[in-house]
Structures are given as structure tokens and as C-alpha cells.
Image (spheres, rainbow, N blue to C red):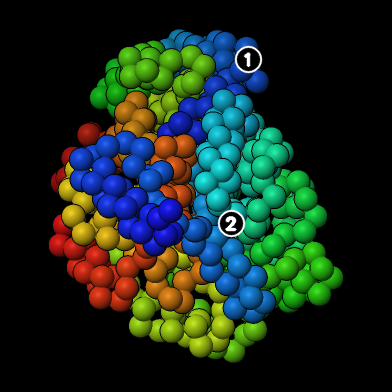
Amino acid sequence: MLPFSQDAFFALFEQYNRAIWPAQIVAYVLALAALALAFWPRDGLGRIVAAILALAWAWNGAVYHVTFFATINFWADIFGAVFIVEALLLLWTGVVRGTLAFRFRGDLASWVGAALAVFAMAVYPLIGWSLGHGWPRTPVFGVAPCPMTIFTMGLVLLTDGRTPLHLVAIPVLWSLVGGTAAWFLGVAEDLALPVAGLGGLALILWHNRRILVPATAAPR
Amino acid sequence: MPSPTSRRTVLAALAGGAAALGLRGAEDAAPGPKLMRAIPSTGEEIPAIGVGSWITFNVGEDKKLRDQRTEVLRAFFARGGAVVDSSPMYGSSEAVIGYGLARIPEKRALFSATKVWTLWQGTGQRQIADSRRLWGFERFDLIQVHNLLRWESHLETLRAEKAAGRIRYIGVTTSHGRRHDELEAIMTKVPLDFVQFTYNAVDREAEQRLLPLAAERRLAIIVNRPFQQGDLIGRVSGKKLPDWAGEIDCANWAQFLLKFAVSHPAVTCVIPATSRVDHMQENMGALYGRLPDARLRLRMAQYVEGL
């Protein structure tokens, strides 16, 4: 049982969106940049994509969860801490160690990843708008955890080489937490969250397995 | 000039008739004096219907929603209410209550009840200080340990606060019908003024041990979730109120369910939660009129069970 109503949830988003404006625009620009870098990859630019994702997770943890959501939900401080851990994991793996690269490979995982990213940026807000969750009473891409998690799942599906599972654990966990809340609150657009989380995880495991067991390694 | 009894009878019949016809406003027709119950430890009387704030008052900083909840509180006081119950666990509810109270001059009857809910005793002391700031005054009528969380150390704090005159009554709470064994043990051995737990027409486990024990130990009882967090309202929605509900001046299902809970002789106060003024008006109708006796209470429970 959630400690707040749907009305209070959307009222919080109205207050949050007005308070942080125009951060939403910045989030869109950064996300487009990250997506572009995945489609037109260059050596070392994976660090920039990872940094953008880390920034988004840190923002959602510190600003959305701890500063705003905590006023109506006693779990929000814990959510905020977990989001910041994800930001640190992305920073360490992708920026400090530089072991992440993103590339559209043309396989199933890539197509699904691109579709999730586009869904989070374009389709998600349209669904919300069509259901009456228009600006400013709506979770906006990049600065709201649910569409940002869908976008993250999309980008990690574009990881070149094996996808580090430690980067996926928290987004998948949030997809379940957020998806449950969406069910209780009747936020239909967020029902895509568990689909993205669990479906994305299945594809990542399949993708990683394909890399571990190359098709050329036929049994003798 | 008609006697109060005959007037009550006539008005009760009118209320029952209006209810049977489904007329709105029938909640105002219940006659008679306000139902008051004594706190056993002092004999002080409080109105038997209060208001809870779980979910319903947790509306954050939104001014429109805060103003609307202020109107809910205003209707509560206007209809004779006093006990307002909240908790730091309820998000912004305490702040929203404080916002409303600051805008309602006619709140002299207020009986303020909040809780302490944290793992550490030191944090609990800060939480109580925060509650004072959010509600907007220095002295609470009642502070309870929420869901028995670290109850031993928090009761130590509450006893000290009570001795210093900053709290009038102390207690412990639980909900959902959980942890009744532990609550029973605390009620048996620890000096308290209040206990709070769940009791309604379908969750009647408390009748076996907690309600008789509270009466024996002279503890005031606050009943939470009288509507089973809305599930009971959902269950009776669209169903016809029985004709005999008029015998106890019930004009709607909310009053029927509240009168079931509040009519147990050991119960001091029932705290339904609502975010709507019209629902508050309906709830507060249960503060007036006749109550069921033991036989009718059983019939009420069986009727609801059968729906």
C-alpha cells in the first residue's frame, strides 16, 4: 500500500517540474547526445554516454527522490541512496575505468534497445498526455525515474561487448518497484517499466551468452 | 412541547426514511447529543469519532490540495470532532494538518494525536520536536509509539515528556490486525493511557483478547481502519442499507460501519480517514444518535459478512 494518492503523486510532479525547469530540456539534449553517440560511435566516447547516464541517475536520486519525493514517501530516501549507488557504478565502470562502449550492432538486442530509448523519450510522454497526465503534472523524461530507467535499459542493450550485470541490477529492481507503484496508482505509461526491466534483462543475458559462446565454436 | 426522547424518535424515523429513499443530506438528520467517551486514566471525555490522516492528508506542498484538506478539517470540527490522528510515517500529513489548523479558528476542541516512528531513541526525540513544529504547538494531547517500533526506548522518552508536561497521554499502536500477541503483552505489563489497533465489522479478532484486556486495564482505545482501508466501503457499495439501520440512526453505510466499531463498550474513539468534505459529513453523522446493543451489533457484523 502506497502512503499517498494518485492526486498527491501528480501534484508532486507539478511542483517538481516547475521547480527544476528548464532541466527537462537539458535532459532531452543530453539523452539525444547519448543516443547519437551510440549510433555513431567513436573510440572513448563511451565515457561520455556513461557520464550522461550517471548524471541522470544522480539527479533522480538526489533531486527527485531525496528532495521532492521524500516529502510524501518515507521510502524515498532509500530510493535516492540506491539511485546514487547506480550513478557511482556507472561513473566507475564507464568513466573512470572506461570499459563501456555503446554501438548499434543491428541485432535483436540493439533494435530493442533503440526502441526502448525512443519509447522513453517520445512515446512515454505521449501516452501520459493522452491519459490526461499533461505538463506539468507528469513524469518527464530524464528527470523522472521511470522513463529514465526505461532509457537506461535501452542504452545498456546497446553496450558493445558483454553488458556488465552490476550496472543492470538497480534499473531492473527499480523497474519492479516502479511498476508495482504504477499498478497501484493507475499510471498506465509506467506499466512499460517492468516489461523494459525484465525483458531487457532477458535480452542482456542472451546477448552476453552469445558473446561467451561464439557461433564458430562448434563442438568436435 | 415534545420531550427530547420523542423528538429523537421522530427524527430517527425521518433519518431512516430518508436513508431508505437514498436522499442526500440525511447524514445531518441524526439527532441527540454528541457521543462522548471517557479516557479511563483521567475521566476526560472526548468525541467518539475522530479523523485519521494516513494517505488522505499526505498531499505535499500543493496549495490547492492543502486548502481542500483544510475544508475537510473544518467540516470535522464543525460537526463536533476533536481527535486528529497522524504520524511522521504519513509523509506530509502532519505538515498539512498544521497548515489546516492554522487556518481554522474554530478548533478549540482539538485533541492532537501523533506518533513516534523511528529505529533510534535519539531520532525519536527529534521526530517529536519536528511534529511540534509541523502541527504548530508545543504540547500534544497524545503521542503513541507507531506500530510498536522500538516501543521500550520510545516509551521511556514519552514518559519523560509526559512528566515534563509536554504530552498529556501516551500509548502504543498497531494496525492491520498484526502483532496482537506482542500488543497484548505490552498492555498487560506496561502503564499506558491509550492503545490503538484495527477493529471493524469483519476484522473482529480484537474482541477476543485486546478489547476486554483494555477495559480491564482501563486503557483508552483508538480504533483504526474502521472501513478496512476502504475495502469495506467497496464491499457495501451499491448495496441497500438494511431497513433496521434506521433503528440506530444510520443514514448511510459509513455511519453503519462506524457505529459498529464505536458501539463496543471498550472503544473510546474511531478514526476513519477521508479526503472529502462530503464523506467527512457522512462520517461525523455517526457521532450522533442511537447505538446498537450487543444483539444488534452481532446482526450488523453478520449482515456485512454476508454481503
Q: Is residue B297 left or right of residue A175?
A: left
For residue B153, what is the image quadrant? bottom right
Q: How many marks?
A: 2
State the residue lying farthest toward the front: B1
Circles 2 and 1: CB atoms closer than 8 Å: no
Is residue B274 shown to the viewer in this render? Answer: yes
Helix, strand or loop under label 1: loop
* Position of residue B135 measured from the top left corner of the image (x, y, whole percent): 71, 47
- Do circles 2 and 1 both sit on a common chain? no
* Position of residue B44 measured from the top left corner of the image (x, y, whole percent): 65, 70
Q: Residues within 10 Å of mark 2 (few under 14, many from 20)?
A: many
| Chain for disc number 2 | B
Residue located 45% across and 43% down the image: B280
- Say which amino acid is labelled 2: Val
The residue pinned by badge 1 equals: A21
Residue located 58% across and 56% down the image: B83
* Position of residue B165 measured from the top left corner of the image (x, y, whole percent): 82, 68
| Chain for disc number 1 | A
Is residue A79 shown to the viewer in this render? Answer: no
The residue pinned by badge 2 equals: B83
Q: Is residue A205 left or right of residue A58?
A: left
Residue located 59% across and 63% down the image: B46
Q: Is residue B7 left or right of residue A199?
A: right
Relative to B180, does residue A180 appear above or below in the rendering? above
Residue A187 bears which disc, if any? none
Q: Residues within 10 Å of mark 1 (few under 14, many from 20)?
A: few
For residue A18, what is the image quadrant? top right
In depth, the one of B167 and B31 nearer the eye is: B31
* Position of residue A4 measured from the top left corner of the image (x, y, whole percent): 48, 41
Helix, strand or loop under label 2: strand
